[in-house]
Image (cartoon, rainbow, N blue to C red):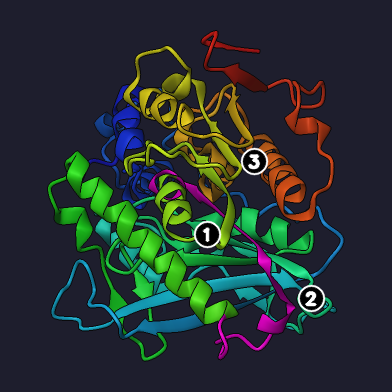
Amino acid sequence: MSHAIEPRHAARRHDRGGLAAVTGLLAVVATAVCVSAPASAAPAAVTPTATPSGTPYLPKPTGTHPVGTTALYLKDASRPDPWVPEMKARELMVSLWYPAKSPGRHRARYMTPKESELLLKDGGITGVPLDLLSRTRTNAFTDAQPAGRRYGLPLVVLSPGHSKPRSELTSLAEDLASRGYVVAAIDHTYENVATTFPDGRVTTCVTCKIKKDPAWWEKLVSSRAADVSFVLDQLTGSHPKWKGARLINRSRIAMAGHSVGGASAIPTMIEDSRVRAGIDIDGMTYAPIPDSGLSRPFLFLGKPSSNTPGSGESQAESWERDWKLMTGWKRWLLVTGAAHTSFTDLGVLADQFGIDLGADIPGARSMEITRRYVAAFFDLHLRHRRQPLLSKPSARYPEVKHCSVATKTCR
């Protein structure tokens, strides 16, 4: 695998299917920190001698609550795994973040050293510490005591992009939890380079080797919708798998995701009425909306290069198709200068490594915007709190453009 950063037009192809893989970032990281990388592989935008300045870290949450986190192992015996049929049950790892009564003693790990090792090796990367990605400093504390009143906390489910670990949505999850949400991020098994289970097994990415076409992507988002519904069953059913589940308000549930994880919000909402609102963050959509339409609130949030209405880009066209069938509250927002990775932890970490991922906006700024608008959407639709930020352009966030599909303009 080449250690060079992909040019922007190549990255756009990944956007169309949610294929902005972890390995692409890892190859980029290697270029910046690995002295053994061939000089010819590094384009001018990269500083080959750049190195991380201290311990990588995620931005602090903006809410008032300390954040706790825990991991759940869930097993759905009602269906075989869609990608490995010999596995007669679908197994999932889920991370939960939630408001805590006080900070705990042990800060949560971003990912395990073994996961970091497999991710780096999958990218063909040598010459860097194998635990490089596991060193990222988070802001949540392992198994801190949950805070909140009975049935008082909204629940948000997060789904990552294809081949990406759930950990790459940690900054967003921590922020929502600090604002009083329970957040569940799902690792969709065999769709990620490395997922660790409690018994020590580490599954790898079976789907990365499958030839992709629109029908396959539709199968993928449908499978993810089934994963989300099962997770909701396990968190809100009569025998919940989390000790803090009594805090969850079962009538205030929503979903957001990045890339194909965001695209999966639509089939999830179609199939599961418990999901009251959804956000697609920079993901091309595949699952068709019925002619009867989708009446629950929905937000498209993305980058202008692939999502400007009327541009003729495949991703924008998929959003325009769905927009026509969305009959409830809806917004189409674009962040000027953003790249596909700008909405995840990768934008923040890339800046700390001195790596150019093609964005014209700093990673910390794009994460601030992502957090603020995602929280505003959920505060409006799950808590019924007025949000002027979503009604018109903001002087505080001039990068964010409100788009009109009717006029094909964004302002």
The amino acid on which the numbered mark 2 sits, given as a three-letter code, is Ala
* Mark 2 or mark 3, earlier in chain: 2
The image quadrant that residue 152 belongs to is bottom right
The image quadrant that residue 213 belongs to is top left
**Pick the front one: 236 or 60:** 236
The amino acid on which the numbered mark 3 sits, given as a three-letter code, is Thr
Secondary element type, mark 2: loop
Q: Identify residue for label 2.
A: 100
The amino acid on which the numbered mark 1 sits, given as a three-letter code, is Ser
CA separation, marks 2 and 3? 23 Å
Q: Residue at x 56, y 48 (%)?
A: 278
Instruction: Based on the picture, tell me whether residue 395 belongs to the magenta stretch.
Output: no
Q: Identify residue for label 1.
A: 273
Secondary element type, mark 3: helix
| Label 3 environment density (alpha carbons within 10 Å; few <14, some 14–19, many ≥20) | many
Find the magenta span and give its range.
237-262
Q: Position of residue 384 (x, y in %)?
A: 80, 49
| Label 2 environment density (alpha carbons within 10 Å; few <14, some 14–19, many ≥20) | many
Left/right placement of residue 211 relative to residue 341 reads left
Left/right placement of residue 75 relative to residue 351 reads left
Q: Where is residue 274 in the image (x, y as percent from the top left)?
A: 56, 63
Label placed on residue 264: none
Q: In which quarter of the image is the C terminus?
A: top right
CA separation, marks 2 and 1? 29 Å
Visible residue check, residue 112: no
Q: Which residue is drawn at 40% across and 12% down?
A: 311
Label placed on residue 370: 3
376 w.r.t. 207: above or below: above
**Pick the front one: 287 or 243:** 287
Q: Do the residues labelled 2 and 1 touch (CB within 8 Å)?
A: no
